[in-house]
Image (cartoon, rainbow, N blue to C red):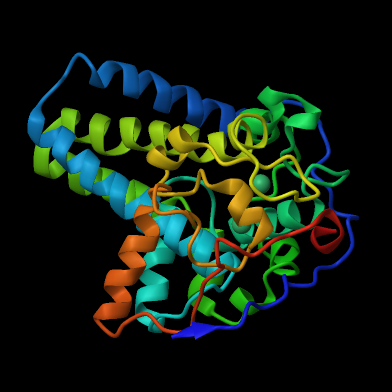
């Protein structure tokens, strides 16, 4: 079923901008440890651990971030049963990209202020800032569920999401314990460190690279671009100019050659009668500067 495109969610003012301040030591420490673990994994190669890591990458970045946090929780571009929504939310938290309120709030602000003052991560403030500088040096808000909830009132109605936002790192720690018991250190290094580091950089590339490099099909008011190699790493999130032009469309790769695995997954869920109310943008829709503003 194809529904009408809905307007972007209306948000509070920009008084909560992500200002620069000193280094966030806890975040920096976790990132350093994860990167060291990812490098160490290369010296403990084993196919079983790599396979588990790949499956977890699909579950957490593909279902958790691309289909869950982004296309479902942020933009509500389709609907699925609540238990599956919660499951995608749980997978999303396992990327260590923060809980649902933090992710959704940050991303809704990004759409509202794209490449303008108040955008949490615009390359106009520097490529490094847009990639990971805003996480390392921006005001840390991932634990402030009440503030982030102002931008995600729809999620605040669910106790599960409030819990998940407060304790977003717990599922990852539990997963690490399970992986250790199942396959020892190599399983943890591949299933946690490599997977999370690759997932973080892939996601951050959507904020940095796809606002700098690639083709612009639509004249949106931001710098968003369609970037095929970021799309390959992120299950279709690299078709970012299409997405900024049509934020509520569940389909991001609009042309046949724009590979969008998340859209294909959604088509499977639709065929199985699980996904409904799917919003889809058409390729030939023309968006002018005036309409985009
Ligand atoms: Zn963007
Ligand atoms: Zn978006």
The quadrant holding residue 108 is bottom right
Q: Is residue 287 above or below residue 25?
A: below
Residue drawn at 33 percent across, 23 percent down: 37
Q: Nearer the viewer, residue 8 or 199?
A: 8
Residue 242 x, y percent position in the rendering: 60, 53
Total numbered labels placed on residues in the image: 0
The answer to whether residue 48 is left or right of residue 96 is left
Residue 81 x, y percent position in the rendering: 38, 84
Residue 278 x, y percent position in the rendering: 47, 78
Q: Dividing the image into four quarters, tell me where ligand 2 lies.
A: bottom right
Q: Is residue 93 above or below residue 273?
A: above
The answer to whether residue 12 is left or right of residue 52 is right
Residue drawn at 66 percent across, 54 percent down: 244
Is residue 144 shown to the viewer in this render? no
Q: Nearer the viewer, residue 230 or 282?
A: 282
Q: Residue furthest top?
A: 43
Residue drawn at 32 percent across, 78 percent down: 270
Residue 248 x, y percent position in the rendering: 60, 68
Which quarter of the figure is the C terminus placed in?
bottom right
Residue drawn at 63 percent across, 48 percent down: 241
Q: Residue furthest front?
A: 284
Which quarter of the figure is the N terminus placed in?
bottom left
The quadrant holding residue 194 is top left
Is residue 259 shown to the viewer in this render? yes
């Amino acid at each position: 079923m194809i529904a009408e495109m809905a307007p972007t969610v209306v948000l509070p003012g920009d008084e909560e901008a992500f200002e620069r301040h000193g280094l966030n030591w806890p975040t920096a420490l976790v990132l350093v440890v994860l990167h060291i673990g990812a490098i160490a994994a290369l010296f403990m190669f084993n196919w079983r651990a790599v396979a588990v890591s790949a499956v977890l990458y699909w579950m957490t970045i593909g279902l958790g971030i691309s289909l869950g946090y982004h296309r479902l929780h942020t933009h509500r571009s389709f609907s699925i049963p609540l238990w599956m929504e919660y499951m995608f939310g749980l997978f999303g938290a396992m990327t260590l990209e923060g809980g649902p309120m933090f992710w959704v709030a940050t991303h809704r602000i990004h759409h509202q202020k794209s490449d303008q003052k108040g955008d949490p991560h615009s390359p106009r403030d520097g490529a490094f800032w847009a990639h990971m500088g805003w996480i390392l040096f921006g005001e840390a808000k991932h634990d402030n569920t009440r503030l982030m909830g102002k931008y995600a009132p729809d999620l605040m109605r669910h106790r599960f999401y409030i819990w998940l936002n407060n304790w977003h790192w717990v599922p990852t720690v539990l997963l690490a314990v399970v992986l250790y018991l199942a396959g020892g250190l190599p399983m943890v290094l591949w299933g946690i460190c490599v997977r999370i580091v690759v997932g973080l950089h892939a996601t951050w590339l959507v904020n940095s690279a796809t606002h700098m490099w690639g083709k612009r099909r639509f004249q949106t008011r931001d710098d968003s671009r369609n970037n095929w190699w970021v799309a390959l790493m992120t299950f279709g999130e690299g078709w970012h100019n299409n997405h900024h032009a049509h934020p509520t469309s569940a389909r991001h790769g609009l042309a046949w050659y724009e590979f969008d695995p998340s859209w294909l997954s959604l088509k499977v869920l639709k065929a199985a009668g699980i996904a409904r109310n799917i919003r889809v943008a058409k390729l030939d829709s023309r968006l002018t500067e005036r309409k985009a503003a």
